[in-house]
Image (cartoon, rainbow, N blue to C red):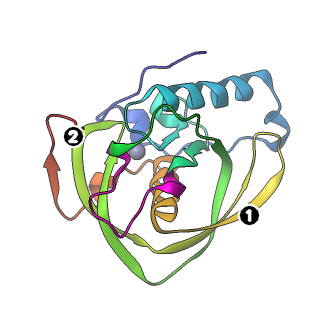
Amino acid sequence: MTKRAIVREPKPVLHQAAKEVLPRAISSKRVKKIISDLSDTLRASEDGIGIAAPQIGVSLRIFVTSEEALTLGTKNKDVKPLVSDKKKEWRHFVFINPKLLKASRKKFDDSEGCLSVPHVFGTVPRAEKVKVAAYDERGKKFERGAAGLFARLLQHEMDHLDGHLFLEKARETHRVEKEKV
Ligand code: ZN
Protein backbone atom coordinates (compact mmCIF):
# COMPACT_ATOMS: atom_id res chain seq x y z
CA MET A 1 0.00 0.00 0.00
CA THR A 2 1.41 3.35 -1.03
CA LYS A 3 -0.27 6.45 0.11
CA ARG A 4 1.13 9.36 -1.87
CA ALA A 5 1.32 12.98 -0.80
CA ILE A 6 -1.53 14.98 -2.29
CA VAL A 7 -0.36 17.89 -4.42
CA ARG A 8 -1.96 21.08 -3.28
CA GLU A 9 -2.82 24.32 -4.94
CA PRO A 10 -0.89 26.30 -6.31
CA LYS A 11 1.41 23.59 -7.79
CA PRO A 12 1.80 23.91 -11.59
CA VAL A 13 0.90 20.23 -12.23
CA LEU A 14 -2.67 21.06 -11.17
CA HIS A 15 -2.89 23.63 -13.94
CA GLN A 16 -1.52 21.55 -16.83
CA ALA A 17 -3.49 19.49 -19.30
CA ALA A 18 -2.55 15.88 -18.53
CA LYS A 19 -1.36 13.50 -21.27
CA GLU A 20 -3.34 10.59 -22.69
CA VAL A 21 -2.26 7.12 -21.66
CA LEU A 22 -1.39 4.90 -24.62
CA PRO A 23 -3.97 2.07 -24.52
CA ARG A 24 -1.20 -0.53 -24.72
CA ALA A 25 0.50 1.08 -21.71
CA ILE A 26 -2.53 0.55 -19.46
CA SER A 27 -1.30 -2.89 -18.47
CA SER A 28 2.24 -1.64 -17.84
CA LYS A 29 3.74 -1.82 -14.36
CA ARG A 30 4.02 1.94 -14.24
CA VAL A 31 0.36 2.63 -14.97
CA LYS A 32 -0.78 -0.18 -12.65
CA LYS A 33 1.27 1.35 -9.87
CA ILE A 34 -0.18 4.82 -10.50
CA ILE A 35 -3.72 3.39 -10.32
CA SER A 36 -3.07 1.50 -7.10
CA ASP A 37 -1.38 4.55 -5.56
CA LEU A 38 -4.40 6.69 -6.51
CA SER A 39 -6.70 4.15 -4.89
CA ASP A 40 -4.61 3.90 -1.72
CA THR A 41 -4.32 7.68 -1.45
CA LEU A 42 -8.07 8.11 -1.94
CA ARG A 43 -8.83 5.49 0.71
CA ALA A 44 -6.47 7.17 3.15
CA SER A 45 -8.04 10.58 2.62
CA GLU A 46 -10.47 11.81 5.21
CA ASP A 47 -13.32 12.79 2.96
CA GLY A 48 -12.34 12.25 -0.68
CA ILE A 49 -14.62 10.46 -3.14
CA GLY A 50 -12.39 10.92 -6.18
CA ILE A 51 -8.79 11.65 -7.10
CA ALA A 52 -7.05 12.45 -10.37
CA ALA A 53 -3.46 11.56 -11.29
CA PRO A 54 -2.24 15.20 -11.33
CA GLN A 55 -3.19 15.33 -7.65
CA ILE A 56 -0.36 12.90 -6.90
CA GLY A 57 1.95 14.73 -9.27
CA VAL A 58 1.40 12.50 -12.33
CA SER A 59 0.31 14.38 -15.44
CA LEU A 60 -1.65 11.54 -17.06
CA ARG A 61 -5.35 11.27 -17.92
CA ILE A 62 -6.37 8.87 -15.15
CA PHE A 63 -8.75 9.30 -12.24
CA VAL A 64 -10.30 7.04 -9.63
CA THR A 65 -13.74 7.48 -8.08
CA SER A 66 -15.33 5.77 -5.12
CA GLU A 67 -18.70 4.06 -5.28
CA GLU A 68 -19.37 5.94 -2.07
CA ALA A 69 -20.40 8.85 -4.32
CA LEU A 70 -23.37 6.74 -5.44
CA THR A 71 -24.60 6.38 -1.89
CA LEU A 72 -24.49 10.05 -0.94
CA GLY A 73 -27.49 12.23 -1.58
CA THR A 74 -27.42 15.33 -3.72
CA LYS A 75 -30.81 16.78 -2.92
CA ASN A 76 -30.20 16.86 0.80
CA LYS A 77 -27.71 19.63 1.46
CA ASP A 78 -26.74 18.06 4.77
CA VAL A 79 -25.50 14.86 3.18
CA LYS A 80 -21.94 15.43 2.11
CA PRO A 81 -18.86 13.26 1.72
CA LEU A 82 -17.88 14.60 5.12
CA VAL A 83 -20.23 12.09 6.73
CA SER A 84 -18.70 9.16 4.93
CA ASP A 85 -18.50 5.69 6.38
CA LYS A 86 -14.78 5.07 6.28
CA LYS A 87 -15.07 1.61 7.73
CA LYS A 88 -16.56 0.35 4.52
CA GLU A 89 -14.25 -0.79 1.74
CA TRP A 90 -15.87 1.09 -1.12
CA ARG A 91 -15.27 -0.16 -4.62
CA HIS A 92 -13.23 2.14 -6.81
CA PHE A 93 -13.93 2.88 -10.47
CA VAL A 94 -10.98 3.73 -12.71
CA PHE A 95 -11.32 6.09 -15.69
CA ILE A 96 -8.45 6.34 -18.18
CA ASN A 97 -8.53 8.83 -21.10
CA PRO A 98 -12.14 9.78 -20.31
CA LYS A 99 -14.20 11.56 -22.95
CA LEU A 100 -17.41 13.41 -22.27
CA LEU A 101 -20.00 12.01 -24.69
CA LYS A 102 -23.06 13.84 -23.41
CA ALA A 103 -23.93 16.42 -20.81
CA SER A 104 -27.45 17.53 -19.94
CA ARG A 105 -28.19 21.15 -20.58
CA LYS A 106 -29.83 21.24 -17.20
CA LYS A 107 -27.38 22.18 -14.46
CA PHE A 108 -27.58 22.07 -10.71
CA ASP A 109 -25.73 23.90 -7.98
CA ASP A 110 -24.07 22.17 -5.09
CA SER A 111 -21.16 22.56 -2.75
CA GLU A 112 -17.80 21.13 -3.88
CA GLY A 113 -14.45 20.65 -2.28
CA CYS A 114 -11.14 19.21 -3.45
CA LEU A 115 -8.34 17.26 -1.80
CA SER A 116 -5.88 19.69 -3.43
CA VAL A 117 -7.63 22.72 -1.93
CA PRO A 118 -8.20 21.65 1.67
CA HIS A 119 -10.88 23.29 3.80
CA VAL A 120 -12.30 25.34 0.93
CA PHE A 121 -15.79 24.73 -0.40
CA GLY A 122 -17.68 26.50 -3.11
CA THR A 123 -20.95 26.35 -5.00
CA VAL A 124 -20.38 25.04 -8.51
CA PRO A 125 -22.96 24.62 -11.28
CA ARG A 126 -22.59 21.25 -13.05
CA ALA A 127 -24.58 19.31 -15.62
CA GLU A 128 -27.14 17.10 -13.89
CA LYS A 129 -26.40 14.11 -16.08
CA VAL A 130 -23.37 13.09 -18.12
CA LYS A 131 -22.21 10.17 -20.21
CA VAL A 132 -18.51 9.38 -20.31
CA ALA A 133 -16.44 6.91 -22.33
CA ALA A 134 -13.13 5.72 -20.91
CA TYR A 135 -10.80 2.74 -20.52
CA ASP A 136 -10.85 0.79 -17.28
CA GLU A 137 -7.79 -0.56 -15.45
CA ARG A 138 -7.77 -3.67 -17.66
CA GLY A 139 -7.69 -1.57 -20.82
CA LYS A 140 -11.31 -2.30 -21.66
CA LYS A 141 -13.33 0.51 -23.16
CA PHE A 142 -16.60 1.32 -21.40
CA GLU A 143 -19.32 3.93 -21.30
CA ARG A 144 -20.97 5.10 -18.14
CA GLY A 145 -23.92 7.37 -17.52
CA ALA A 146 -24.12 9.27 -14.27
CA ALA A 147 -26.48 11.63 -12.52
CA GLY A 148 -26.39 13.83 -9.45
CA LEU A 149 -23.34 13.66 -7.23
CA PHE A 150 -21.62 11.02 -9.34
CA ALA A 151 -22.09 13.17 -12.47
CA ARG A 152 -20.67 16.12 -10.52
CA LEU A 153 -17.70 14.04 -9.43
CA LEU A 154 -16.93 12.92 -13.00
CA GLN A 155 -17.00 16.54 -14.21
CA HIS A 156 -14.78 17.66 -11.33
CA GLU A 157 -12.22 14.91 -12.05
CA MET A 158 -12.27 15.50 -15.81
CA ASP A 159 -11.56 19.16 -15.13
CA HIS A 160 -8.45 18.09 -13.19
CA LEU A 161 -7.17 16.31 -16.31
CA ASP A 162 -7.56 19.56 -18.26
CA GLY A 163 -5.72 21.52 -15.58
CA HIS A 164 -8.78 23.17 -14.04
CA LEU A 165 -9.78 23.41 -10.41
CA PHE A 166 -13.34 23.83 -9.12
CA LEU A 167 -12.32 27.25 -7.79
CA GLU A 168 -12.42 28.62 -11.34
CA LYS A 169 -16.12 27.71 -11.61
CA ALA A 170 -17.23 28.26 -8.04
CA ARG A 171 -19.65 31.10 -7.51
CA GLU A 172 -18.85 31.56 -3.88
CA THR A 173 -16.19 29.94 -1.77
CA HIS A 174 -15.78 29.68 1.96
CA ARG A 175 -13.28 28.15 4.34
CA VAL A 176 -14.21 25.47 6.80
CA GLU A 177 -11.34 25.32 9.28
CA LYS A 178 -12.42 22.24 11.12
CA GLU A 179 -13.92 19.14 9.60
CA LYS A 180 -17.52 18.64 10.59
CA VAL A 181 -18.06 15.34 12.30
ZN1 ZN B 1 -10.36 17.89 -6.96
Give the x, y percent position of residue 156: 44, 55
Q: For the C terminus, which image quadrant?
A: top left
Foreground residue, 22 or 49?
A: 49
Q: Which quadrant: the N terminus?
A: top right
Find residue 121 and name its label. Answer: none
Mark closer to the chain start, 2 or 1 = 1
Locate residue 62 relative to residue 138 in the image: left or right. left
Q: Mark 2: which amino acid?
A: Lys
Q: Quadrant of residue 33?
A: top right
Which residue is situated farthest in the bottom direction here?
A: 105
Ligand 1 is in which quadrant of the figure?
Answer: top left
The answer to whether any part of residue 164 appears in the image is: yes
Tell me the number on the disc at residue 143.
1
Could you tell whether 36 is left or right of 135 in the image? left
Residue at the extreme top of the image, as rendered: 1
Please state the extent of the stretch shown in magenta in the rendering: 69-82
Residue 56, given in percent of the width and then of the height, sits at: 49, 28
Q: Does the magenta stretch include residue 79?
A: yes
Residue at the spot 33% in from the left edge and 56% down from the top edge:
79
Q: Name the residue under label 2.
A: 180
Q: Quadrant of residue 92?
A: top right
